[in-house]
Amino acid sequence: MSKFTRRDMLKTTVGAAVAGPALLAAARSWAQEMKFTPEPGAKLRMLRWKRFVQSEEDAFLALIDAYTQATGVEIRIDSLGFEDLRPKAAVAASVGTGPDIIWNIHADAFLYPDALVDVSDVCNYLGEKYGGWYPIAEEYGIKDGKWIGVPFVMSGNFINYRVSWVQDAGYDGIPDNTTDFLDLMKKLKANGRPGGFALGNASGDGNAWAHWILWSHGGSVIDKDENVVINSPETIASLEYVRELADTFIEGAASWLDGNNNKAFLASDISVTNNGISIYAAALREGMTDISDDMDHAFYPVGPVGKPTEFHVAFPMLTYKHSDFPEAAKSLITWMMEADQYNQFLQGAVGYLTQPLRAFEDHPVWTEDPKRAVFQKASERSLSFAYPGKLGRAATEVFADFVVVNMVAEAATGRKTPQEAAEDAQRRAERYYVL
Amino acid sequence: MAVIGESPGRMPRVTLGARLHNNNNFLGLLFMIPAGIMLLVFLAYPLGLGVWLGLTDVKIGRPGKFIGLGNFRWLAQDSLFWLSVFNTLLYTVVASVIKFGLGLWLALILNKHMPFKAMIRAIVLLPFIVPTVLSAMAFWWIYDAQDSIISFLLIQLGLIDSNIDFLGKANNARASVIAANIWRGIPFVAITLLAGLQTISPTLYEAATIDGATRMQMFRKITFPLLTPIIAVVMTFSVLFTFSDFQLIWVMTRGGPFNATHLMATLAYQRAIVGGSLGEGSAIAVAMIPFLLSAILFSYFGLQRRKWQQGGTDD
Amino acid sequence: MTDRPASTTKNADEGGTDYLETIPYRVVAVYLPLGVFLFVLLFPFYWMTIATFKSNTELLTTEGFAALWIVKFTFENVERLLFQTEYPRWLVNTLFVTFTATFLSLFCAVFAAYAIEKLRYSGARLVGLAIFLAYLVPPSILFIPLATIIFKFGLFDTPFALILTYPTFLIPFCTWLLMGYFRSIPYELEECALVDGATRFQILRKIILPLAVPGLISAGIFAFTLSWNEYLYALVFISSSEVKTAPVGVVTELIEGDVYRWGSLMAGALFGSIPVAFLYSFFVQHYVSSMTGAVKE
């Protein structure tokens, strides 16, 4: 293994921020009375997904640096694209080697709960201190009464739209109900400004909108008791809606992966899509003011069920049992989530990432730019993909197999009738639940 | 080396061969040691374990138990699995046949005398050199639903009037990923066959020309038979690598749209690594073995054993 | 070999009858198809090249004809790649891993191929067939059990994790390719040398290898390229940025969630490949000679 030194870390993460004196002082005084004491001589290695935005990584690394200086725990951060975390995490869980902490995506913790350190003490402490966890955070964090991961952040995925084009179509913004939304999309299409939602095997955007539309009409993969109920009249109703909605899409959305709608939106090819804040951030970064000024974000319209049914992406931090320094890992995560630090981090994340603890809801990051406002609610409004059931292995397997995304795509493109698509999804989901 | 030109008599060969036979066994073993160690240490165990996993219900992070053919019974009822088998066969057969045809053609062209020969040969290798993950991204972009340069050019030329939906329709997507695979694979086939062409003695052609043979006859009677062993090797490997292709698909479509481009290797990865069902994923990989084996055996018995040269080695 | 007459070498790879071809025939049969091949094979590179030097905003807009060339030339993407990531270091890592793995594989493969093809020890054919087994489980699954081995040897996060695993998929191919070339070397040559008292090792070194240079080059090019391109093992077995290979590094560093730094990604694809292409152009020249003089009956 390579040596861990602070200099190395700073060297390898180009442009990394170093902790300023104030942060350092805060870290030193925090370290005097920290809740979890790192093992003597502890060293940690963390693997995280590649930052979405530089300022988030800078804030993150500055906090880590301060922690290292205050506690002497050397920390090494490596990053990878979030899709590429999967094989690493799989090796870590099955071979029992790898990073101490993986900052992972979705509910992968439920695939290998036994390989993970119980972090109930950390989460209970943080929950009590910071106004409690949002229910979604508990869903992603707790298995059988134990916290198996710390739900560090959620990443909001909302409707992105071009304000002026929507106005041209006769609406002030994105309507709050699915009926008007369909009407808007039809008008946009008629105006030559179609929208588009990813229909390919896109694990972020594809899942987000497919689950939204399924739930909005009362459909779901499973019910509360884990029976597969996806082949239901509600699902078929949602797919009939999808069928109509998809006619308003730009050509080719069937092939879209997570990155395509960003490109199409920035190229002014589409007027409406669903995405995180990354399109907006890229427009700002590249100085494309014609787009950044003319775009905004909105909640998903509410369907016949009469309540929001949104899907946002969880990014929990998982500590592996093979780690020699679990207490240090707990200590580090606690440090990162204490108010002073977490506030800086949230600021750096400029809306990409949303707090899982209620106390951070009033963070200025949500008000300083009104276009970020909806992202404040990502944790509050998100359901888990197992909704209304509980997350678990079978739910994760169905999710990994793109059952819902495929069903919606097949109905959307008319390859299957809504009935056939729902039947097929039922069969595919049952494979995992009958065990 | 001075004796190269002269063909030795037949007599010493038999006796020499007999005399050295035992010696050869020992030497053979000795010469096999480096490759043997590498393969046995680094491959035998993982390979065995990989096959074994297919017979268990191991999940990532959870040990499993032996369930015999349970995974296969399970997969047999899975329409997505069968779709991936179909896709894989289509992908492999179409891509390999075209790669072979075009690759051989390109090799024959490159075998001619022309200016900048070495440079052209190196340029031809470029698609093979670029890391697949990056060239797949370039193709992903070239095939973009909105900003495809191909659609753009064809529209400008007035040949079509709307964007081609390269990756959004099942058959278009299949054709597109196959085209990308061919693009990547041709250089290797061509250059390897070119090396084979170089070993064919020009005197054979000269003699044939004097005898009044046509180009086609020369190709069929000289080039092709003499090239057969190399063709067999190259195509076997081309088939093997195409069959287990992963990166290209994973970057461009992730198996979509509607799983129309999911190959067995990508489905195995999706089930085993993303979904955590290591046993089931391995079973998909194991299900690939019969196909791979038959490709190998076909090449081995069908093509490999053809006689190569006079005084050939396949006695 | 060494005293081969120069005149034979000169026209060695012309297929012997080129002088009979007329100019129009050559245009139709050679240059036209070659032109089409080159166009198709190189078009994506053209695309990568202009993407490398376009600004990000220009990459996104496809208004008018601007898509086909660069309106505003910029070094921004190249600069990002070379100075804001560790690309140069990744290239060095990749070269180190690639050269070592290639050398190791060729070394193993030469002996194995010679033994199987020329020594023909008992069971050689079976071993030759068994070597193919290496390809039976695709890397997309194989990396999990392989990781166990890497872990047991303590090789995680070192270049040796790659140097020692790449040969597992390189040796079988190289061996088979070399077997093919070795077979084309007449047995008589060896017999003579054996009669003269040469050892097998001397024969391999002095007779077989020089004659099999084109085979060695194609096996080498193959092995080099496959190591150069490999992604999954490099992703899984390496964690530290200092040890990463170029493909993994580039993808990690230049894709931010769903935002692709297209210009720099394409620059990363090009910058690594073009030097290798030059290297190959030097090697493929050797295709021309070596063989022909000897095989002539």
Image (tube, coloured by chain):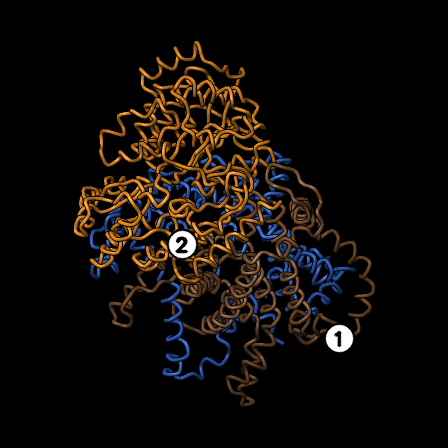
Chain colours: A orange, B brown, C blue
Residue on which disc 1 sits? B9
Q: What amino acid is at disc 2? A: Leu
The picture places residue A191, in percent across and down from the top left corner, at 20, 57
Question: Taking A202 as reference, is B171 above or below it?
Answer: below
Residue found at x 43% / y 32%: A136
The picture places residue A154, in percent across and down from the top left corner, at 39, 33
- Disc ID at residue A239: 2
Compare residues A361 and C195 and report the one nearer the observer. Answer: A361
Question: Taking A372 as reference, is C123 above or below it?
Answer: below
Q: Is residue A191 left or right of residue C216?
A: left
* Badge 1: residue crowd in 10 Å (few <14, some 14–19, many ≥20): few
Q: What amino acid is at disc 1? A: Gly
Quick check: do tags 1 and 2 share a chain? Answer: no
Q: Is residue B69 visible?
A: yes
Name the chain letter of the residue that bears numbered label 2.
A
Name the chain letter of the residue that bears numbered label 1.
B
Compare residues A11 and C198 and report the one nearer the observer. Answer: A11
Residue found at x 37% / y 27%: A60
Question: Taking A41 as reference, is C146 above or below it?
Answer: below
Q: Is residue C171 visible?
A: no
Figure quadrant of residue A156? top left
